[in-house]
Image: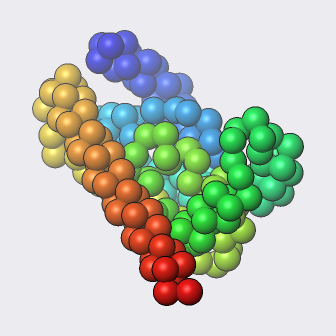
Amino acid sequence: MAHHLFISFSHFFHLYGYWTIFLATLLEGAGIPLPGETLLLFAGFMARSGDIHLTVAILAAIGGSTAGESVGYLIGWLGGDAFLEAHRKRLYISTSVYERSRTIFLKNAGWAMVAARFIAGFRELAGIVAGVFQMDFPAFFFYNLAGAIAWSITMCAVGFLVGKSWRRLLHVFGHLDLAALIVFAGVVAALALRYWWRGRKKTTSA
């Protein structure tokens, strides 16, 4: 698998250069599942070898991922409510669940937008969810850009610093990705429990 990724990424970089990073991160941010973090690790790996410039790779990733999540936000804003209304019963999403989810997300949208960048699966959906829940656009754009900067610098820097061996790099990243997912799930569970407990206390006091 590592060898096939190495060959594929090398081929695209040879043909399209930094546009490979920009377009891949843009499409991923818009909701299309692509291996964005692996591509940035590879960009850092190539920068260590002297094949590309690390700073330009980071800037391409920041631009692409910021633009991509903005497209996702627009998709969610324009079509999210209509999609949910049409498929809510099929997806088993009640009005109360939807409203609770929206409230929790908007209260914690800042850190959620940044943290979601580092977790495959969440990264593709963050912009769309923010649009569906109609997050204030200036706040969305600020956290979108902040997350893009943090994610792009981190992934490219890891690839650059640990990039002596492509196989070793993927092995290290696998552990980091799992750890990030566990931490994110734990925080989400804690917030949901806190929201449920507050609601219960209000009901009891009433």
> Can residue 4 be seen?
yes
Q: How many marks?
A: 0
Among the 4 quarters of the image, the one containing residue 192:
bottom left
Viewer-closest of 101 and 52:
101
Q: Is residue 22 above or below residue 15?
A: below
Give the position of the N terminus as an image quadrant.
Answer: top left
Asked whether, in this view, residue 165 is left or right of residue 30, the answer is left
Viewer-closest of 57 and 130:
130
Kindly identify the residue that appears in the image at 27 percent across and 39 percent down: 178
Q: How is the image coloured?
A: rainbow
**Residue 83 pos. (x, y %):** 81, 46
**Residue 121 pos. (x, y %):** 49, 40
Among the 4 quarters of the image, the one containing residue 27:
top right
Asked whether, in this view, residue 14 is left or right of residue 68, the answer is left
**Residue 33 pos. (x, y %):** 56, 33
Asked whether, in this view, residue 102 is left or right of residue 20, the answer is right
**Residue 196 pos. (x, y %):** 47, 67
Q: Is residue 53 above or below residue 114?
A: above
